[in-house]
Image (cartoon, grey):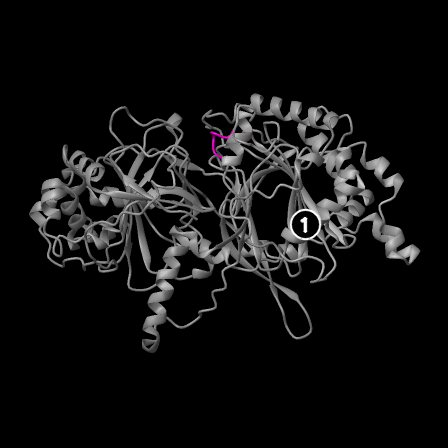
Amino acid sequence: MSNSEEPLSKRPRLPSSEEKAETLLHSTADAASDKDDKHETLAILNPKIIHGLDEIAKIYREAKPYSHAVLDPIFVDGFAEKVLDEVKHNLKAKFKESDLFRVYQSIDFANISPESNPTLKDTMPSLMTLREFLYSSYWRNCIEKMSNLTPGTLTDQIDCAVNCHDKGCHLLCHDDVIGTRKVSYILYLTDPEPNWTDEDGGRLELYESITEEVAVAVEPENGTTKKSFVTKVPGVIPVKTLLPRFNTLAFFVVEPGVSFHSVQEVFCDRPRLSIQGWYHAKEKPKEMEHASLNQLKTDAWQDLSEDFTTPVSMECKQKTGSSDDATKLSRKDVEYLSRYINKTYLRPESIQEICKRFEEESSVQLRHFFNEEWENKVSKLLREEDDKCCVGRDRPVLDYSVGVSEEWLLVGPAHKQRFLEYVGEAKHDGNTSGSLLKFLKEAVMQSTEFGKLLKSFTNLGMPLGYRGKVRRFRPGLDYTIAHYGILTKKAVLDATMCFVSGKGDQSIGDETDHDDDIIWQSDDKGGFECYISADDDDDDDDDDDDDNDGKTERKKKKEAEDEYDEEDDTKLLSVSASNNTLSLVYRDPGTMRFIKYVGIGAPSSRWDLSLEYQVEDNDDEAASVNNDDEDGDVSGIDDDVGF
């Protein structure tokens, strides 16, 4: 989504547009040297590692949830300190952010060559020594022995970079499987003083792999059917975490559907520095279909098997035989809706203006949607629940199950999503957040009257069906990831009713702005909903075909970009979280969406009623969501009618 560069010697912060200007390192690509200086290797490596390879291999084999090990410390005293100092004063970092991550990253070390740029040995001697050490034949043999790999498995391909996770930075769950990656490693260079603790965040999180039956859509000549297969997915929360202690190296074999891991958000003001890299094999691993990236690009069956519920309004439409008479918003409908909805939105002139805006933009956001009585009821309960759970407003989250109960269930798997879904009862006079939100979902958003209002707002016709959830996204924990399983076969109308802290006003840049509204609208703490176009990658050429070397290289490059830079995804629309705001978006079959990870700096949880409405096919009534709105400001209509 975005890129920038700034010196690693400075503590990163939210960059301005000027600070995001890219600065290239003054070096060119060069292949790794095959020469190996074993004496120099022995001089910097901790002697206990050299003499304890068999014991480390045993620890590695027995580790859970999958084989891994941590070398602590990896280098002799003084060497890692020199590397850290050179990194801070010589390298630049590019800011990168997508649905999966937020990080500052240096240039790939494969493009830093002392042979092509001899001055590097003078300016960064320890870093160049480290580069040669990590990919030397001696150390690769050590990695193979500790990881129980066949000798000669790992090639000399250099693939690593410095990652700087500043406060708020994170990397969500994935298995690292891309191309020929074989072993993943992380060398931690966080400042040694003071010691890093759980309260600082930034832990390496390891997930258990679970076997799951998945159904995908197939389309034979006689119509769409489904086909089931078994795949491996991560659990919802990690089962083990590792602190990023200075001068330690964690490593594990990259295995499709097994090596699931993530980097917890950094809670503190200290940057979490590390060198993240991979050792490659000559061939891709087996069972690539289980790889998390492949799973994200698989058309899951969920959007076809989970039927839309047929509204009562359709029964009325079928009985009367006249869709216009049956679905026209009547005085009685308005009276019912006015018990809950801001009356401004029920005025004919407001409805007309909303419809006009929706037809122009394919989306509209309606602020202060529920009336003051219901807004106050909901806000009070949600605020109390966040305070009870001690989440938001920079309070570190150390319990992954905070807020989980028999009524609020964890939803995963973690490589696609994590949030809480309310499955309890709906209550009109509910004294819990979930019961009241579900009541509004059922009494309002699933009602015949609301269906008629949507028809009036959008001119898409009466909804043919609906489905949806009551969700909570907890700061420091929850998110959804864009994936092909979200795609639908036909266009749908997304209606998302959002509740967060703040007044829900559009910030105008003066003293009247509420602090929480400013934070949410900045999108810096996440919680916004983003729509992007699906990537049509139909290149299925055989990588072993010598006639397709060019295509193979482009495909490998594309695979790497999928993990590290989502600029290939086309951002169509971004909707900031806003209290008591209804977002209506017409989403076509080629569009994915996600809720950006909610950081601990968010003022509250993001709560929403997320519904999808099946609509009639009519290309003339509304165009799909487009990219006319780059800044996410798609407020409904003019202030004089309450938006």
Residue 612 % position (x, y)? 68, 49
Q: Amino acid at mark 1?
A: Phe
Instruction: Report which quarter residue 642 is drawn in.
Output: top right
* Total marks in image: 1
Give the left or right position of residue 150, taking residue 625 as reference: left
Q: Would you say residue 235 is visible in this rendering?
A: yes
Residue 100, compared with residue 285, is above or below; it is above
Magenta span of residues: 599-604
Please name the residue shown 28% across and 46% down the image.
106
Q: Quadrant of the C terminus?
A: top right
Please tell me whether mark 1 sits on a helix, a strand or a loop. helix
Does the magenta stretch mainly form a helix, a strand or a loop?
Answer: loop
204 vs 536, nearest the viewer: 536
Q: Which residue is mark 1?
A: 358
142 vs 20, nearest the viewer: 20
Residue 235 % position (x, y)? 50, 43
